[in-house]
Image (cartoon, rainbow, N blue to C red):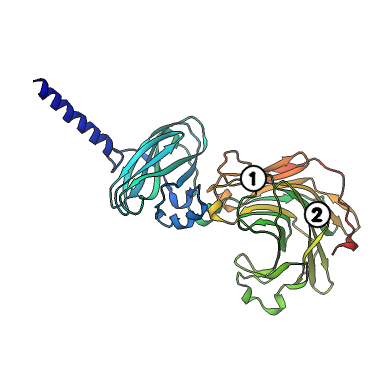
Amino acid sequence: MKSKSFFRASVAMLFLLFFACQKNEAQTENYNYTVSIPTQGNSWAVNNINKNQEMIGDDGIHNWTDNSLKIKTYFKTTQTGELTVGMIAKAETGASKIKATFNGESQIINIRNQSSDTIFVGNFETEQTGYQFIELEGIEKEGAMFPAIESFLLGGEAASDPVYFVKDDFYWGRRGPSVHLNYQLPENHGDIQWFYNEITVPENNDVLGSYFMANGFAEGYFGMQVNSETERRILFSVWSPYSTDNPDEIPEEYKIKMLKKGEDVYTGEFGNEGSGGQSYLRYNWKAGNTYRFLLNATPTGNDETDYTAWFYPPEAGEWKLIASFRRPKTDTHLTRLHSFLENFMTETGNRQRTGYYTNQWFYDADGKWNEITKMRFTADATARKENRMDYAGGAKDKSFFLQNCGFFSDTTPIDTIFEREASGTPPEIDFEKLP
């Protein structure tokens, strides 16, 4: 009798173990999922950015072969409590085992189904609202690839109120929100001939794909970029008055003309966001240093305006000419002064970056410097439609700041007016001695 009891207990134990192994495979219970988060727009390979374009596309996560990768999927919750997590996945080349971690708690998931199916991941507790992430790691696989994952499913109390994530426009969602400083100028100010600004990027915020734009105006922009692991640029561009994204379509009388350029500066044309004249200096600017930017606009009196940009790196100790462009069909001084911070690489849309914009001044036609101490904080359509909520801006001491990407939770209300402390000391620049 004892051996029969032992046999029955062993069978029962094996059954329980089998059931436990199976519960994370095809859906076995009717969980009430209320939110579906597409991995296409919300997931990143966080420890190898070069894998993002290869692995995350129109079908979500796929072509996943490397078990050293960590993949995070981000979303923002507004409620605490229990969070039920599932996913729609399939085994592309054979059964595999992966680990899913949320809020420090991990579950091992076995996936064998060869067509897309709903897989239960686990029930978790959330004690804080704000941005969260589910992290995936590959454990074992029979074939060449770990499973393809189309989306994550959320239910429970923590998913009962709005959950924010990228729902559409995935390219822009993966780039992250762009944020802007719209400078508020005194009423009845004179014609603006010169615009001066400074930028400091804190250490570890010079993230690949960042554009810290200093001197923006109605017809163009001027600032500094991180273009690759080995290249950085000081970029100055002026739009053509002819509306097209293809510079080859611009009639000759509407083309931006290059008047002069600095040493080692590239000049040419750009497209895909309007078209016009472009210039850049490859320059290895450094996080932690403060860089100065100066822009001039001079109408020629012949329905043309000349725009010229200079850059002052503290390492060189002198102003460097970037370029001077002539814009046809234009008779204006500088207008709509602004700065912005954007990320132009989808692969780094999960990395936070911050820039400090300091000591803004404009020089008017009466020969007087005027300090700019107010700005209106704005953000792009990705932020305004609440696809991404990781954006911020404001004033800190004598600087304005902009921050985006990285899935931080504290958001600045769009269209808020901020005022910084005045420095009271205008820049000392001898315009006649500029190169």
Q: Which of 314 and 80 is in front in this view?
A: 314
Apparent side of residue 338 relative to residue 271 in the rendered image (left or right): right
Instruction: Provide the residue designation for mark 2.
Output: 196
Where residue 3 appears, x then y in whole percent? 11, 23
Residue at 39% x, 39% y: name it. 85
Mark 2 residue type: Tyr
Q: What element carries label 2?
A: strand
Apparent side of residue 342 relative to residue 163 in the rendered image (left or right): right
Residue at 67% x, 72% y: name it. 242
The disc, 1 or 2, on the residue closer to the chain's N-terminal end is 2
Q: Is mark 1 on a helix, strand or loop?
A: loop
Where residue 114 appears, x then y in whole percent? 28, 52
Check the picture and name the quadrant holding the N terminus.
top left
Residue at 31% x, 53% y: name it. 143
Where residue 405 appears, x then y in whole percent? 58, 47
210 up-or-down from 1: above or below: below
Where residue 124 appears, x then y in whole percent? 41, 33
Mark 1 residue type: Asn
Q: Which of 408 and 322 is in front in this view?
A: 322
Which numbered mark, 1 or 2, is in the foreground of this view?
1
Number of on-image labels: 2
Q: Answer yes or no: do the residues labelled 1 and 2 have beta carbons within 8 Å?
A: no
Instruction: Provide the residue designation for mark 1.
Output: 204
